[in-house]
Image (spheres, rainbow, N blue to C red):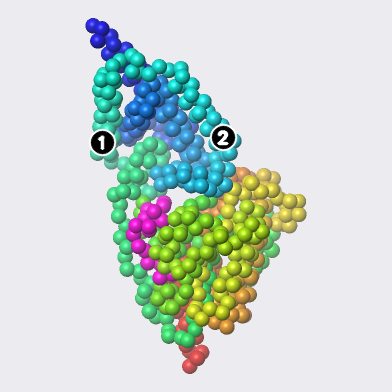
């Protein structure tokens, strides 16, 4: 009887109380999510099993560490609350829920806090840390260990039983799952709920294998005529560049006067569909370099460089190297970010130039300015016997834009009349876009007089994060802008129609224009 009472006491303390209350609160916490997923009782048995199994597994791990059931419950709910808040912050900024691939950004936020913490909120981060430490201390001090209520043997059996139940629930959830993963995060998130969404994307990530087909560009490159001199090529992925004038008619036309001029001379120009909104630059970057679309990459589209580090890709850099080009990447930020220092040699680049080649005096706002990068690129193009391909990833216009302030002159200069209400971030953005416009002029003018001739490809990786502006003026289309220019066309007006393309089509277009230019060069010599 004593044993039975002891058993019932521990059972009520460890199972009936904290576990039941914790699971109920866990489902209730989903009402805080943005977007709000389908209510739990309308989901499938597999989705509910995955949610409950995940919660119980974390609870068992917390019990193993602290042996305090109510404190363990609070810790598990705190972990879920953190994921909810991070999800909401990401969705607010990028219109995409938190993905399983995003867990790696927790370590990146420690290494590069300026890029991440301002979107979550520095005050929120400090407050959350203080609350966690306070609860940790209070929980350990105020709640007694279960070892004081039951024997260690009894506790070990109870813990193993809970662990076994959690694993069984997870197995049932994955085994019975019939929910299709559409790879449209917002759609899947709404249908599955946050926990199931993370599980099924993780499973898809580990199960899905992307083939590495032979690059179709090889045939294009083989058509390039044998000429004595190939043009230098500069491809610029301009941070957050898009022609905001097409979405907001309050902006003065002269903000992008250089862009307008070069578009009128370009062999290809138009708007670009990119797989990113506000951030996730590497999705656009990888699509340009490899010519592989999001559909082609499948689940790996959300973190392509993690896949590329294990599976070799054929890129435009490889193709140009086969023609005798020297290949250089210029990115004024630490090379370790996104593992570029390890990956870029495998992507066909001879040399990677990072922030160590620049200095603090070259910053414009928070990052190295576009004109400093333009001057560095021009130095790479001087006097080299080989033709050079330079791939540039700029940083000047990277957010958070709200960390900078617009001055009164800018509020008047960039608009047809004056800055609209709640559009301070747009003014800061336009101030940096004007520098990007000057970078276009500088590179164009340098390539136009180069003895070898030159090609300039320019595109934006995504639209910027400006939620207050979008609330005031409306959401932009999400398209960015591009052009492909050749020095041979600098004195003419391009008659090509404006075309909307996918980012994966841009590098093949660039190589196609190189074929045309090399053929023209050969005919001129003959």
Residue in the picture at 47% in, 71% down: 327
Tell me the crowding category of disc 2: few under 14, some 14 to 19, or many 20 or more residues within 10 angstroms, Cα based.
Answer: few
* Front-lying residue, 70 or 239: 70
Q: Are marks 1 and 2 in contact (CB under 8 Å)?
A: no
Q: Secondary structure at mark 1?
A: helix
Q: Secondary structure at mark 2?
A: helix
Visible residue check, residue 291: no
Tag on residue 290? none
Describe residue 203's horizontal placement relative to residue 499 as left or right: left
Position in image of residue 239 (x %, y %)? 56, 58
Residue 111 vertical position relative to residue 355 in the rendered view, above or below? above
Tag on residue 126? 2
Visible residue check, residue 6: yes
* Front-lying residue, 397 or 74: 74
State which region is magenta. Answer: 300-318
Magenta highlight on residue 302: yes
Residue in the picture at 60% in, 65% down: 373
Residue in the picture at 64% in, 64% down: 371
Q: Earlier in the sequence, mark 1 or mark 2?
A: 2
Q: Which residue is mark 1?
A: 171
Quarter of the image where the N terminus is located: top left
- CA separation, marks 1 and 2? 37 Å
Position in image of residue 323 (x %, y %)? 42, 78
Describe residue 316's horizontal placement relative to residue 471 as left or right: left
Describe residue 346's horizontal placement relative to residue 495 as left or right: left
* Front-lying residue, 501 or 275: 275
């Amino acid at each position: 009887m004593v044993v039975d009472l002891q058993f019932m006491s521990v059972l009520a303390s460890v199972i009936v109380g904290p576990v039941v209350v914790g699971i109920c609160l866990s489902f209730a916490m989903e009402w805080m999510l943005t977007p709000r997923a389908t209510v739990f009782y309308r989901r499938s048995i597999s989705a509910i099993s995955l949610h409950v199994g995940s919660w119980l597994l974390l609870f068992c791990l917390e019990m193993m560490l602290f042996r305090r059931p109510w404190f363990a419950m609070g810790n598990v709910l705190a972990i879920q609350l953190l994921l909810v808040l991070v999800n909401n912050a990401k969705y607010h900024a990028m219109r995409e829920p938190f993905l399983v691939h995003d867990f790696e950004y927790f370590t990146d936020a420690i290494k590069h806090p300026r890029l991440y913490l301002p979107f979550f909120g520095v005050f929120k981060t400090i407050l959350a840390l203080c609350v966690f430490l306070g609860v940790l201390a209070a929980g350990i001090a105020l709640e007694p260990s279960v070892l004081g209520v039951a024997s260690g043997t009894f506790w070990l059996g109870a813990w193993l039983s809970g662990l076994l139940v959690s694993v069984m629930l997870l197995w049932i959830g994955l085994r019975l799952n019939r929910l299709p993963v559409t790879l449209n995060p917002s759609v899947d998130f709404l249908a599955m709920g946050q926990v199931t969404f993370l599980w099924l994307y993780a499973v898809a990530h580990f199960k899905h294998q992307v083939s590495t087909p032979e690059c179709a560009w090889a045939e294009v490159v083989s058509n390039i005529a044998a000429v004595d001199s190939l043009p230098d090529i500069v491809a610029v992925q301009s941070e957050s560049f898009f022609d905001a004038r097409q979405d907001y008619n309050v902006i003065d036309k002269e903000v992008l006067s250089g862009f307008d001029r070069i578009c009128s001379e370009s062999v290809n120009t138009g708007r670009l569909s990119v797989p990113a909104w506000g951030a996730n630059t590497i999705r656009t970057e990888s699509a340009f370099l490899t010519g592989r679309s999001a559909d082609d990459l499948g689940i790996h589209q959300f973190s392509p460089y993690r896949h590329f580090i294990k599976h070799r890709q054929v890129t435009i850099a490889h193709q140009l190297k086969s023609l005798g080009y020297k290949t250089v990447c210029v990115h004024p930020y630490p090379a370790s970010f996104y593992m570029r220092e390890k990956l870029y040699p495998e992507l066909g680049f001879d040399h990677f130039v990072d922030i160590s080649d620049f200095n603090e005096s070259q910053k414009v706002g928070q990052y190295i300015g576009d004109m400093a990068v333009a001057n560095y690129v021009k130095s790479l193009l001087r006097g080299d016997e080989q033709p050079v391909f330079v791939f540039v990833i700029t940083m000047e216009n990277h957010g958070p834009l709200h960390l900078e302030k617009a001055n009164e002159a800018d509020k008047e200069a960039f608009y047809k009349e004056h800055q609209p209400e709640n559009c301070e971030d747009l003014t800061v953005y336009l101030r940096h876009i004007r520098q990007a416009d000057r970078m276009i002029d500088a590179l164009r003018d340098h390539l136009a007089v180069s003895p070898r001739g030159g090609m300039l490809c320019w595109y934006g990786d995504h639209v910027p994060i400006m939620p207050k502006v979008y609330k005031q003026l409306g959401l932009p289309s999400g398209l960015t802008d591009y052009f492909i220019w050749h020095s041979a066309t600098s004195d003419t007006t391009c008659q090509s129609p404006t075309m909307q393309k996918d980012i994966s089509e841009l590098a093949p277009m660039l190589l196609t224009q190189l074929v045309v230019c090399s053929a023209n060069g050969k005919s001129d010599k003959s």
